[in-house]
Image (cartoon, rainbow, N blue to C red):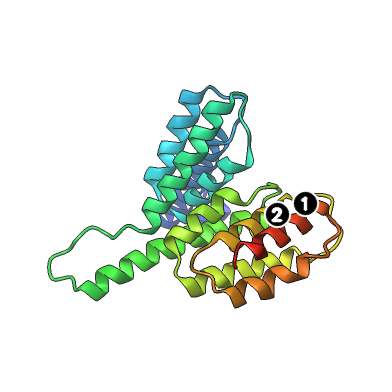
Amino acid sequence: RRPCTFIARIVPSKTVFMVFGLFSKERALQKTIEKATNKLSQQPDRWGALEKLKEEGSEEALYGLCKRWGVTSLKGVEDEVEKNWVVDVLVEKGNSYPAAVTGQTTEQREEGRRKNSDAVLAALVRFMKSSNELSLSYPLRVIEKIADHDRVIEIVDELFASEPPGYTRFAERRIDLIKWFCEWKEATDDEVISRVKPYVPDFDEVVRFTAIEGLGSRD
């Protein structure tokens, strides 16, 4: 008789297969993300990986799509096309309804759309918090098209809190945030002033200029 392994003795064989199957799926997904974010890959290879992530549609896959913004490929035009494609895909996903089911109510379909939106927003927030990417312009473009006013303000406040006025080696993130927030049409003057005014005396000259210009545009 074949000797039993320790795992086989304590875990049913069906469960073992399920666990290893899950690990295998996760490894495959990570490899796909690596392909999609490899700036040295040929564009067809990256496109294929990006399409797979779109089809997968899980929060981890959506996060993988976001990570494409964090790398710059060798060809500028291709790079911009791919990053804009990710914006479009995430906006579409965040506003999409689940497949219609007989007897499903309008409220249930709307709940399905909210779940899709929440999944995309979770991936976006995770990317912006964990990434060393200096620019926030791409994720902010998605957020404004899929989140309601209160959710946008909630996310923006988290971002402002992570970028307090004062010295920083890299000011691009707060510059993007200030510029975008001042231009966001759903924000009230009071919401903009209370959040942007502290950056008027900022250490960085470009941040100061962006804040002053943004506040002036609200007149």
Evaluate whether residue 185 shows in this view.
Answer: yes
Q: Secondary structure at mark 2?
A: helix
Q: Amino acid at mark 2?
A: Ile
Q: Secondary structure at mark 1?
A: helix
Verify CB contact (< 8 Å) between mark 1 and mark 2: yes
Indicate the position of residue 208 as horizontal and vertical percent values: 78, 58
Indicate the position of residue 31 as horizontal and vertical percent values: 54, 37
Q: Which residue is mark 2?
A: 175
Q: Which residue is mark 1?
A: 206
**Quadrant in which the C terminus is drawn:** bottom right
Residue ID at (18%, 70%)? 104
> In the visual, does 171 lie left or right of 100?
right
Residue ID at (44%, 58%)? 145
The CA distance from mark 1 to mark 2 is 7 Å
**Outermost residue to the left:** 102
Residue ID at (48%, 48%)? 61
Residue ID at (32%, 66%)? 112
Q: Amino acid at mark 1?
A: Val
